[in-house]
Image (cartoon, helix red, strand yellow):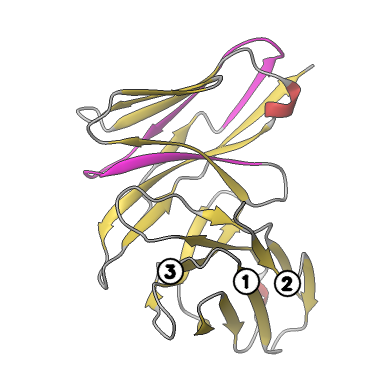
């Protein structure tokens, strides 16, 4: 029941440039989240955007959500070598019983920032 | 800060062995999750638990079982490990899974089944 799909699968940019990653999903959502994963490590939550929000900022991160197109984008401005990681979007796939919502992850975008 | 600790960073087991992966969280979170992550497939949910002794199947529960005897601890069990269970296993927790809850992840256990 894969929900979100990130695009592109891989992205390579120079330090200082902006990086944009996209996420598309198939069904209605309550919220969409973005996570970051450094190589071989666990995921770290970056930002959450609710279905009634269109844009959200956190430091150098900007997330947009277009529910009519069922898509979201993550923009990292003025990228740094330390931003090199994989980025995942995650959507709640709806109520799954016992009072809980199941969060479903996409396959991720691998970002390389070259110094 | 929330801490989710997975007992092993790397694990090598033989086919047919019983394998226990342990996960402990220190923030009194209600919900705990086990995912596996494979190249090209992303993260897939194996099992989750919303309360002590309660569990729910995720997308790929076959070949796995779980145990949650205490709120802070969630164990993933491979009853008879097989080579196709070689993967990165990620444990996560959340305070109360509603519509606006984020997950906190452990560092992962890279399991190799030979």
* Quadrant the N terminus of chain A occupies: bottom left
Q: Is residue B8 above or below residue A64?
A: below
Is there a contact, CB below 8 Å, between mark 3 and mark 1? no
Q: Which residues are magenta?
A: A10-37
Q: Is residue B19 above or below residue A45?
A: below
- Estimate the x, y position of residue B87 in percent, counting from the top left: 65, 64
Q: Secondary structure at mark 1?
A: strand
- Estimate the x, y position of residue A41 in percent, counting from the top left: 70, 50
Q: Secondary structure at mark 2?
A: loop
Which numbered marker is on residue B7?
2
Q: How dense is the environment of label 1, judged by Cα within 10 Å: few (below 14), some, or many (20 and up)?
A: many
Residue B68 seen:
no
Q: CA distance from mark 1 to mark 2?
A: 8 Å
Q: Residue at x 51, y 45 (%)?
A: A107
Q: Which residue is mark 1?
A: B24
3 or 2: mark nearer the eye: 3
- Horizontal side, residue B105 vs residue A16: left or right: left
Q: Tell me which numbered mark, 3 or 2, is placed earlier along the sequence.
A: 2
Which numbered marker is on residue B30?
3
- Horizontal side, residue B91 vs residue A57: left or right: right
Specify whether disc 3 shares its chain with disc 1. yes
Q: Tell me which numbered mark, 3 or 1, is placed earlier along the sequence.
A: 1
- Estimate the x, y position of residue B22 in percent, counting from the top left: 65, 76
Q: Residue at x 72, y 50 (%)?
A: A40
Q: Tell me which numbered mark, 1 or 2, is placed earlier along the sequence.
A: 2
> Mark 1 — on which chain does it sit?
B
Q: Secondary structure at mark 3?
A: loop
Q: CA distance from mark 3 to mark 1?
A: 12 Å
Res. A77 image quadrant = top right
Q: CA distance from mark 3 to mark 2?
A: 20 Å
């Amino acid at each position: 029941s894969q929900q979100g799909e990130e695009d592109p699968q891989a992205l390579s940019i120079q330090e200082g440039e902006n990086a944009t990653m996209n996420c598309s999903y198939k069904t209605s959502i309550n919220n969409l989240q973005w996570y970051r994963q450094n190589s071989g490590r666990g995921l770290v939550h970056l930002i959450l955007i609710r279905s009634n929000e269109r844009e959200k900022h956190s430091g150098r991160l900007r997330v947009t959500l277009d529910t009519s197109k069922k898509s979201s984008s993550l923009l990292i401005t003025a990228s740094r070598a330390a931003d090199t990681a994989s980025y995942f979007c995650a959507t709640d796939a709806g109520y799954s019983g016992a009072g809980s919502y199941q969060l479903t992850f996409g396959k991720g975008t691998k970002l390389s920032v070259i110094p | 800060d929330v801490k989710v600790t997975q007992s092993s960073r790397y694990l090598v087991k033989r086919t047919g062995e019983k394998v226990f992966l342990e996960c402990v969280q220190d923030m009194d979170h209600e919900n705990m999750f086990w995912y596996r992550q494979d190249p090209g497939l992303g993260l897939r949910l194996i099992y989750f638990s919303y309360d002590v002794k309660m569990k729910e199947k995720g997308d790929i529960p076959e070949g796995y079982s779980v145990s949650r005897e205490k709120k802070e601890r969630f164990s993933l069990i491979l009853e008879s490990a097989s080579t196709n269970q070689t993967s990165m296993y990620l444990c996560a927790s959340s305070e109360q899974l509603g519509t606006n809850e984020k997950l906190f992840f452990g560092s992962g256990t890279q399991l190799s089944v030979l």
